[in-house]
Amino acid sequence: MDRREVLKGITALPLAAAAVHGKTSASMKIKKPRRLKRGDTVALVAPSSGVSDAEFNRAIQNLENLGLKVKLGKYVRETNGYLAGTDDQRAEDLNRALADKEADAVWCIRGGYGLTRILPKIDLAAIRKNPKPIIGYSDTTALLLAAHQATGLVTFHGPGGSSTQSEYTRKHLTAALMEPAAPHKIELSPEYATRDNLLYKTQVITPGKAKGRLIGGNLSLITAMAGTPFGLRDVKGKILFLEDVNERPYRVDRMFVQLAQSVDLRNAAGIALGIFDRCEPPNDNSQTVIDVVRDHLGMLGIPVIYGLSFGHIRDQFTLPLGIEAELDTAKATVTLLETAVA
């Protein structure tokens, strides 16, 4: 192959990425899935890490407690080392669920690791033809972000199927998916206000109010997807939300560096950070996560707040990607300005 052919192939890479994504995010029409109601059927899938017996049973019980019927993926109990089956098995289960007209939603049992491996195998056409709620968090960020950016579908950063569903969690989950009302104001979990752990304390980095469409998810996943056809492309005029767990402050620092070099964070309307649980510094000489956040986000000139009630925590609220919302740092609230389902 001569040099001109090599350059031609390199030049074609952005076009290939555009073909995966379709329209740019600025011109994407938002598509709201039909709301879930009692008696609906949910496809329960495991596209990331393997599922324990306890997680499997809890996921079924959680969905049944919401009045939903459960339809299991063919390979939902498979294991392949730290993965829930092979890439082909996990992709087949997910694509079958996305295309299944009898399934009213797709719910991921848990996160962990593995979804980025199968992103190129996801049937985006099935999502466009048969839009339905897709719910999960953590590793599921990869699916939520890729599906939303490629199709405009509102996806739901909320509890995984096996997550512990507190009264707070269920309240905001059902408000987003099953009993929609707008505006819907989301306040901090009262339980976390009494904790001594500084990672659970709300910290206003830059005060103010911001309005815009919600976009975001798990920080580790968003930075891992940077530079791929599925990565976060545009935050202009949007409220970016981020969370993570079990990361040392220096690793959080590294991820914020990569994020800032991937997208222009100054263009965001505001940034809402969840609780970075188990991200304590290793010793007294280390920066804290709050130090890292101030260092990277404190000079952007937009509202930024740390410590809202979402992330790898029991009391977590649900954030629909693509929905207009308002962030108020003084009140530590996120208000959904429109319903997320039709």
Image (spheres, rainbow, N blue to C red):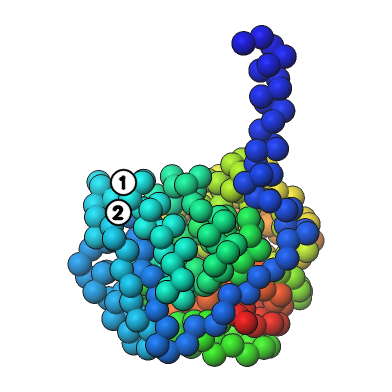
Q: Secondary structure at mark 1?
A: loop
Rate crowding at label 1 as few (under 14), some (14 to 19) or many (20 or more) other CA atoms within 10 Å: some
Rate crowding at label 2 as few (under 14), some (14 to 19) or many (20 or more) other CA atoms within 10 Å: many
* Tag 2: amino acid: Ala
Direction top: furthest residue: 2
Q: Position of residue 326 (x, y in %)?
A: 71, 77
Residue ID for mark 1: 86
- Residue closer to the observer: 48 or 42: 42
Residue 332 appears in the figure: no
Quadrant where the C terminus is found in the figure: bottom right
* Tag 1: amino acid: Thr
Q: Are circles 1 and 2 on residues that touch, CB within 8 Å?
A: no
Instruction: Residue at 51%, 53% (x, y): give it.
Output: 123
Residue 73 appears in the figure: yes
Residue ID for mark 2: 84
Q: Position of residue 21 (x, y in %)?
A: 65, 50
- Residue closer to the observer: 270 or 253: 270
Instruction: Residue at 42%, 83% (x, y): give it.
Output: 40
